[in-house]
Amino acid sequence: MKPEKYIEHNNNLRTYLNEENNKYYEELLIQTRLLSFFKNEQKVEEVLLDILQDLIDYQKAGKNFVDVYGDNIHKIAKDIVKNILQDNILKNLKLVLLSVIMFIVSSFFISISFKQSINILEYVFSYTLTIVIIAVALFILIKMLHKLKPISSLIILMIFFNAAIFIPILASRSIDFYNMANGKFNISVTTSLIVAVFLATVIVTFSIAKATNSYKILLPLLIPQFANLVLVFLFKNSTSTQSLIVSSVILVISFIIALTIVYKNSK
Amino acid sequence: MKVNTSQILKGLLEACVLKIISTRDMYGYEITENLANKGLEIVSQGTIYPLLLKLEKENLLISYSKESPDGPPRKYYKITKNGLQYIEEFREIWSEISSSINNILN
Protein backbone atom coordinates (compact mmCIF):
# COMPACT_ATOMS: atom_id res chain seq x y z
CA MET A 1 0.00 0.00 0.00
CA LYS A 2 1.23 3.46 -0.77
CA PRO A 3 1.84 5.85 2.13
CA GLU A 4 -1.08 8.04 1.05
CA LYS A 5 -3.46 5.09 1.40
CA TYR A 6 -2.17 4.41 4.90
CA ILE A 7 -2.65 8.07 5.82
CA GLU A 8 -6.19 7.97 4.45
CA HIS A 9 -7.01 4.88 6.54
CA ASN A 10 -5.37 6.56 9.53
CA ASN A 11 -7.48 9.70 9.16
CA ASN A 12 -10.64 7.59 8.88
CA LEU A 13 -9.89 5.35 11.85
CA ARG A 14 -8.93 8.20 14.16
CA THR A 15 -12.60 9.20 14.28
CA TYR A 16 -13.18 6.09 16.42
CA LEU A 17 -10.93 7.36 19.17
CA ASN A 18 -12.35 9.21 22.13
CA GLU A 19 -11.14 12.76 22.74
CA GLU A 20 -8.40 11.95 25.22
CA ASN A 21 -6.97 9.01 23.29
CA ASN A 22 -7.09 11.05 20.13
CA LYS A 23 -5.09 13.83 21.75
CA TYR A 24 -2.31 11.48 22.80
CA TYR A 25 -2.32 9.49 19.58
CA GLU A 26 -2.12 12.61 17.42
CA GLU A 27 0.83 13.80 19.46
CA LEU A 28 2.52 10.47 18.72
CA LEU A 29 1.60 10.81 15.05
CA ILE A 30 3.15 14.26 14.73
CA GLN A 31 6.36 13.42 16.57
CA THR A 32 6.92 10.17 14.70
CA ARG A 33 6.35 11.77 11.31
CA LEU A 34 8.66 14.68 12.06
CA LEU A 35 11.42 12.44 13.39
CA SER A 36 11.27 10.14 10.37
CA PHE A 37 11.97 12.74 7.70
CA PHE A 38 14.67 10.68 5.98
CA LYS A 39 13.14 7.29 6.70
CA ASN A 40 10.96 5.03 4.59
CA GLU A 41 7.59 6.80 4.67
CA GLN A 42 5.58 3.69 3.86
CA LYS A 43 7.03 1.75 6.79
CA VAL A 44 6.41 4.66 9.16
CA GLU A 45 2.77 4.99 8.17
CA GLU A 46 2.38 1.20 8.38
CA VAL A 47 3.51 1.16 12.02
CA LEU A 48 1.39 4.20 12.92
CA LEU A 49 -1.71 2.51 11.51
CA ASP A 50 -0.89 -0.69 13.38
CA ILE A 51 -0.65 1.22 16.65
CA LEU A 52 -3.94 3.00 15.92
CA GLN A 53 -5.78 -0.26 15.20
CA ASP A 54 -4.50 -1.78 18.45
CA LEU A 55 -5.41 1.39 20.37
CA ILE A 56 -8.98 1.15 19.10
CA ASP A 57 -9.18 -2.45 20.33
CA TYR A 58 -7.85 -1.36 23.73
CA GLN A 59 -10.36 1.47 23.85
CA LYS A 60 -13.15 -1.04 23.23
CA ALA A 61 -11.77 -3.04 26.17
CA GLY A 62 -12.04 0.04 28.36
CA LYS A 63 -8.36 1.00 28.44
CA ASN A 64 -6.98 4.37 27.38
CA PHE A 65 -3.77 5.50 25.68
CA VAL A 66 -1.80 6.18 28.85
CA ASP A 67 -2.76 2.84 30.43
CA VAL A 68 -1.51 1.00 27.38
CA TYR A 69 1.40 3.03 26.04
CA GLY A 70 2.44 5.23 28.94
CA ASP A 71 2.79 8.98 28.57
CA ASN A 72 6.37 9.32 27.34
CA ILE A 73 5.36 9.91 23.75
CA HIS A 74 8.70 11.25 22.67
CA LYS A 75 10.41 8.03 23.74
CA ILE A 76 7.91 5.85 21.88
CA ALA A 77 8.32 7.92 18.72
CA LYS A 78 12.11 7.77 18.99
CA ASP A 79 12.18 4.01 19.52
CA ILE A 80 9.89 3.38 16.57
CA VAL A 81 11.88 5.57 14.21
CA LYS A 82 15.17 4.07 15.38
CA ASN A 83 14.16 0.68 14.04
CA ILE A 84 12.96 1.81 10.65
CA LEU A 85 15.38 1.66 7.79
CA GLN A 86 16.44 4.81 6.02
CA ASP A 87 14.86 5.57 2.72
CA ASN A 88 16.98 4.50 -0.16
CA ILE A 89 19.86 6.92 -0.55
CA LEU A 90 19.05 7.77 -4.15
CA LYS A 91 15.64 9.14 -3.21
CA ASN A 92 17.06 11.40 -0.52
CA LEU A 93 19.84 12.50 -2.82
CA LYS A 94 17.31 13.45 -5.49
CA LEU A 95 15.47 15.54 -2.90
CA VAL A 96 18.63 17.37 -1.91
CA LEU A 97 19.69 17.86 -5.53
CA LEU A 98 16.29 19.19 -6.49
CA SER A 99 16.30 21.76 -3.70
CA VAL A 100 19.81 22.89 -4.62
CA ILE A 101 18.76 23.39 -8.24
CA MET A 102 15.57 25.22 -7.20
CA PHE A 103 17.61 27.49 -4.99
CA ILE A 104 20.26 28.28 -7.58
CA VAL A 105 17.73 29.01 -10.29
CA SER A 106 15.62 31.32 -8.15
CA SER A 107 18.62 33.19 -6.73
CA PHE A 108 20.05 33.50 -10.22
CA PHE A 109 16.94 35.09 -11.62
CA ILE A 110 16.51 37.43 -8.68
CA SER A 111 20.14 38.53 -8.86
CA ILE A 112 19.83 39.19 -12.58
CA SER A 113 16.68 41.23 -12.11
CA PHE A 114 18.36 43.31 -9.41
CA LYS A 115 21.50 43.68 -11.53
CA GLN A 116 23.75 42.25 -8.87
CA SER A 117 26.89 40.27 -9.53
CA ILE A 118 26.69 36.49 -9.31
CA ASN A 119 28.96 35.08 -6.69
CA ILE A 120 29.28 31.30 -6.30
CA LEU A 121 30.73 31.52 -2.82
CA GLU A 122 27.81 33.59 -1.70
CA TYR A 123 25.40 30.97 -3.06
CA VAL A 124 27.21 28.21 -1.16
CA PHE A 125 27.07 30.28 2.01
CA SER A 126 23.39 31.10 1.56
CA TYR A 127 22.52 27.50 0.85
CA THR A 128 24.40 26.28 3.90
CA LEU A 129 22.56 28.90 5.92
CA THR A 130 19.25 27.56 4.60
CA ILE A 131 20.11 24.03 5.71
CA VAL A 132 21.25 25.27 9.12
CA ILE A 133 18.07 27.24 9.64
CA ILE A 134 15.90 24.28 8.65
CA ALA A 135 17.83 21.93 10.92
CA VAL A 136 17.74 24.31 13.89
CA ALA A 137 14.06 25.07 13.41
CA LEU A 138 13.10 21.39 13.25
CA PHE A 139 15.34 20.62 16.22
CA ILE A 140 13.77 23.37 18.30
CA LEU A 141 10.29 22.27 17.31
CA ILE A 142 10.86 18.61 18.18
CA LYS A 143 12.43 19.45 21.52
CA MET A 144 9.62 21.84 22.41
CA LEU A 145 6.81 19.67 21.13
CA HIS A 146 6.41 17.73 24.31
CA LYS A 147 6.92 20.69 26.60
CA LEU A 148 4.75 23.41 25.09
CA LYS A 149 1.35 23.40 23.45
CA PRO A 150 1.66 23.07 19.65
CA ILE A 151 0.33 26.59 19.05
CA SER A 152 2.95 28.14 21.32
CA SER A 153 5.68 26.17 19.59
CA LEU A 154 4.52 27.42 16.21
CA ILE A 155 4.46 31.03 17.37
CA ILE A 156 7.99 30.73 18.69
CA LEU A 157 9.02 29.16 15.38
CA MET A 158 7.44 32.04 13.48
CA ILE A 159 9.30 34.59 15.58
CA PHE A 160 12.52 32.65 15.01
CA PHE A 161 12.05 32.73 11.24
CA ASN A 162 11.33 36.41 11.17
CA ALA A 163 14.30 37.11 13.41
CA ALA A 164 16.43 35.07 11.05
CA ILE A 165 15.61 37.48 8.22
CA PHE A 166 15.27 40.68 10.16
CA ILE A 167 18.35 40.56 12.39
CA PRO A 168 20.98 40.14 9.64
CA ILE A 169 19.34 42.99 7.74
CA LEU A 170 19.22 45.18 10.83
CA ALA A 171 22.81 44.31 11.68
CA SER A 172 24.07 44.93 8.19
CA ARG A 173 22.39 48.30 8.02
CA SER A 174 23.69 49.53 11.34
CA ILE A 175 27.17 48.25 10.61
CA ASP A 176 27.10 49.78 7.13
CA PHE A 177 26.03 53.07 8.60
CA TYR A 178 28.80 52.95 11.20
CA ASN A 179 31.57 52.18 8.73
CA MET A 180 30.33 54.33 5.91
CA ALA A 181 33.26 56.69 6.44
CA ASN A 182 36.15 54.20 6.04
CA GLY A 183 34.23 51.97 3.60
CA LYS A 184 36.47 49.07 4.66
CA PHE A 185 34.15 46.70 6.41
CA ASN A 186 30.88 46.00 4.73
CA ILE A 187 28.42 43.21 5.39
CA SER A 188 26.04 43.19 2.51
CA VAL A 189 22.91 41.20 2.88
CA THR A 190 22.39 40.03 -0.63
CA THR A 191 19.29 38.84 -2.33
CA SER A 192 20.40 35.20 -2.31
CA LEU A 193 20.69 35.35 1.47
CA ILE A 194 17.18 36.71 1.77
CA VAL A 195 15.86 34.14 -0.68
CA ALA A 196 17.69 31.41 1.26
CA VAL A 197 16.11 32.25 4.57
CA PHE A 198 12.71 32.72 3.00
CA LEU A 199 12.93 29.34 1.23
CA ALA A 200 14.00 27.72 4.48
CA THR A 201 11.00 29.04 6.35
CA VAL A 202 8.63 27.98 3.58
CA ILE A 203 10.12 24.47 3.43
CA VAL A 204 9.93 23.99 7.19
CA THR A 205 6.37 25.32 7.39
CA PHE A 206 5.25 23.04 4.56
CA SER A 207 6.89 19.92 5.96
CA ILE A 208 5.37 20.52 9.38
CA ALA A 209 1.96 21.14 7.79
CA LYS A 210 2.32 17.89 5.84
CA ALA A 211 3.38 15.94 8.93
CA THR A 212 0.56 17.27 11.04
CA ASN A 213 -1.99 17.52 8.24
CA SER A 214 -2.86 21.04 9.40
CA TYR A 215 -2.43 23.26 6.35
CA LYS A 216 -5.12 25.74 7.41
CA ILE A 217 -3.34 26.52 10.66
CA LEU A 218 0.21 26.67 9.41
CA LEU A 219 0.10 28.41 6.06
CA PRO A 220 -1.14 31.73 7.52
CA LEU A 221 2.14 31.77 9.46
CA LEU A 222 3.83 32.50 6.16
CA ILE A 223 2.10 35.88 5.93
CA PRO A 224 4.75 37.73 7.98
CA GLN A 225 7.38 35.98 5.88
CA PHE A 226 5.90 37.35 2.67
CA ALA A 227 5.55 40.75 4.29
CA ASN A 228 9.20 40.55 5.33
CA LEU A 229 10.29 39.66 1.83
CA VAL A 230 8.31 42.47 0.22
CA LEU A 231 9.46 45.06 2.76
CA VAL A 232 13.10 44.05 2.40
CA PHE A 233 13.00 44.61 -1.33
CA LEU A 234 10.96 47.80 -1.07
CA PHE A 235 13.26 49.43 1.47
CA LYS A 236 16.41 47.84 0.16
CA ASN A 237 18.33 51.01 -0.45
CA SER A 238 17.12 53.19 2.36
CA THR A 239 18.86 53.06 5.70
CA SER A 240 16.79 55.79 7.34
CA THR A 241 15.22 55.09 10.69
CA GLN A 242 11.89 56.15 9.25
CA SER A 243 11.83 53.30 6.76
CA LEU A 244 12.90 50.94 9.51
CA ILE A 245 10.03 52.06 11.71
CA VAL A 246 7.53 51.75 8.87
CA SER A 247 8.78 48.23 8.06
CA SER A 248 8.59 47.21 11.71
CA VAL A 249 5.04 48.48 12.06
CA ILE A 250 3.91 46.72 8.86
CA LEU A 251 5.63 43.55 10.10
CA VAL A 252 3.90 43.68 13.48
CA ILE A 253 0.54 44.19 11.74
CA SER A 254 1.17 41.16 9.53
CA PHE A 255 2.07 39.17 12.66
CA ILE A 256 -1.23 40.13 14.25
CA ILE A 257 -3.17 39.24 11.10
CA ALA A 258 -1.43 35.87 10.86
CA LEU A 259 -2.02 35.05 14.53
CA THR A 260 -5.69 36.00 14.30
CA ILE A 261 -6.20 33.74 11.29
CA VAL A 262 -4.32 30.91 13.02
CA TYR A 263 -6.42 31.19 16.18
CA LYS A 264 -9.64 31.34 14.19
CA ASN A 265 -8.67 28.24 12.21
CA SER A 266 -7.62 26.27 15.26
CA LYS A 267 -10.97 26.62 16.96
CA MET B 1 16.40 2.34 43.26
CA LYS B 2 13.23 0.57 42.12
CA VAL B 3 13.42 -2.67 40.21
CA ASN B 4 13.01 -1.83 36.54
CA THR B 5 10.88 -4.62 35.11
CA SER B 6 11.29 -3.59 31.50
CA GLN B 7 15.07 -3.66 31.88
CA ILE B 8 14.89 -7.26 33.11
CA LEU B 9 12.47 -8.20 30.36
CA LYS B 10 14.40 -6.67 27.46
CA GLY B 11 16.09 -9.74 26.06
CA LEU B 12 13.47 -12.18 27.30
CA LEU B 13 10.57 -10.41 25.65
CA GLU B 14 11.85 -11.09 22.15
CA ALA B 15 11.89 -14.83 22.73
CA CYS B 16 8.47 -14.72 24.40
CA VAL B 17 6.89 -12.81 21.53
CA LEU B 18 8.37 -15.26 19.02
CA LYS B 19 7.07 -18.23 21.01
CA ILE B 20 3.60 -16.70 21.18
CA ILE B 21 3.33 -16.23 17.42
CA SER B 22 4.80 -19.64 16.73
CA THR B 23 1.40 -21.15 17.62
CA ARG B 24 -0.44 -18.97 15.07
CA ASP B 25 -0.12 -15.69 13.16
CA MET B 26 -1.30 -12.72 15.20
CA TYR B 27 -1.64 -8.96 15.11
CA GLY B 28 -0.19 -6.57 17.72
CA TYR B 29 -3.13 -6.44 20.09
CA GLU B 30 -3.46 -10.23 20.14
CA ILE B 31 0.23 -10.62 20.95
CA THR B 32 0.15 -8.30 23.98
CA GLU B 33 -3.12 -9.81 25.18
CA ASN B 34 -1.63 -13.29 24.96
CA LEU B 35 1.42 -12.16 26.92
CA ALA B 36 -0.84 -10.56 29.53
CA ASN B 37 -2.90 -13.76 29.84
CA LYS B 38 0.26 -15.75 30.52
CA GLY B 39 1.03 -13.30 33.31
CA LEU B 40 3.37 -10.91 31.49
CA GLU B 41 1.90 -7.42 31.75
CA ILE B 42 4.32 -5.31 29.77
CA VAL B 43 4.66 -2.08 31.71
CA SER B 44 4.66 0.13 28.66
CA GLN B 45 3.14 -1.56 25.64
CA GLY B 46 4.78 1.01 23.42
CA THR B 47 7.79 -1.29 23.58
CA ILE B 48 6.13 -4.01 21.54
CA TYR B 49 6.28 -2.08 18.26
CA PRO B 50 9.99 -1.31 18.07
CA LEU B 51 10.53 -4.91 19.22
CA LEU B 52 8.43 -6.31 16.36
CA LEU B 53 10.24 -4.05 13.91
CA LYS B 54 13.58 -5.28 15.21
CA LEU B 55 12.59 -8.94 14.98
CA GLU B 56 11.44 -8.37 11.41
CA LYS B 57 14.75 -6.74 10.53
CA GLU B 58 16.55 -9.79 11.94
CA ASN B 59 14.28 -12.02 9.85
CA LEU B 60 12.98 -13.86 12.90
CA LEU B 61 9.44 -13.01 11.86
CA ILE B 62 7.70 -11.50 8.86
CA SER B 63 4.63 -9.31 8.62
CA TYR B 64 1.85 -9.32 6.07
CA SER B 65 -1.41 -7.48 5.54
CA LYS B 66 -4.63 -9.38 5.91
CA GLU B 67 -7.92 -7.98 4.70
CA SER B 68 -10.33 -7.25 7.53
CA PRO B 69 -14.11 -7.37 7.17
CA ASP B 70 -14.64 -4.01 8.83
CA GLY B 71 -12.00 -1.44 8.01
CA PRO B 72 -8.49 -1.32 6.60
CA PRO B 73 -6.25 -4.41 6.38
CA ARG B 74 -4.54 -5.49 9.58
CA LYS B 75 -0.87 -6.31 9.93
CA TYR B 76 -0.25 -9.90 10.99
CA TYR B 77 3.04 -11.28 12.26
CA LYS B 78 4.26 -14.73 11.28
CA ILE B 79 7.24 -16.64 12.60
CA THR B 80 10.04 -17.74 10.29
CA LYS B 81 12.31 -20.80 10.35
CA ASN B 82 15.04 -18.61 11.83
CA GLY B 83 12.59 -17.54 14.50
CA LEU B 84 11.78 -21.12 15.46
CA GLN B 85 15.47 -21.88 15.66
CA TYR B 86 16.01 -18.81 17.82
CA ILE B 87 13.38 -20.01 20.28
CA GLU B 88 15.07 -23.39 20.67
CA GLU B 89 18.51 -21.87 21.21
CA PHE B 90 17.07 -19.37 23.66
CA ARG B 91 15.26 -22.10 25.61
CA GLU B 92 18.51 -23.95 26.22
CA ILE B 93 20.44 -20.88 27.29
CA TRP B 94 17.57 -19.64 29.45
CA SER B 95 17.21 -22.85 31.40
CA GLU B 96 20.96 -22.80 32.17
CA ILE B 97 20.97 -19.15 33.17
CA SER B 98 17.72 -19.18 35.13
CA SER B 99 18.80 -22.07 37.35
CA SER B 100 22.15 -20.38 38.03
CA ILE B 101 20.46 -17.12 38.90
CA ASN B 102 17.93 -18.82 41.12
CA ASN B 103 20.84 -20.45 42.88
CA ILE B 104 22.52 -17.11 43.44
CA LEU B 105 19.44 -15.23 44.57
CA ASN B 106 18.08 -17.89 46.91
Image (tube, grey):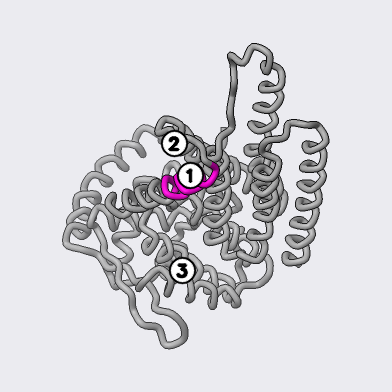
Viewer-proximal residue, B58 or A229? A229
- Would you place residue A236 above or below residue B67 in this image? above
Chain letter belonging to callout 2: A
Q: Which residue is mark 2?
A: A118
> Which residue is painted at 26% across and 46% down in the image?
B95
Which residue occupies the extreme front position in the image?
Answer: A115
Viewer-proximal residue, B43 or A107? A107
Identify the secondary structure beneath mark 1: helix
> Which residue is painted at 53% across and 59% down in the image?
A211
Point out the frontmost of discs 1 and 3: 1
Looking at the picture, which amino acid does disc 2 mark?
Answer: Ile
Dots 1 and 2: beta carbons under 8 Å? yes
Marks 1 and 2, how far apart in space?
8 Å
- The image shows residue A12 at horizontal and vertical percentages of 54, 78
Query: The C terminus of chain A is located in which quarter?
Result: bottom right
Q: Which residue is mark 3?
A: A49
Whichever of callouts 3 and 2 sits on the residue coming sooner in the sequence is: 3
- Would you place residue A227 above or below residue A13 in this image? above
Query: The N terminus of chain A is located in which quarter?
Result: bottom left
Do the residues marked 1 and 3 share a common chain?
A: yes
> Which residue is painted at 52% across and 47% down in the image?
A113
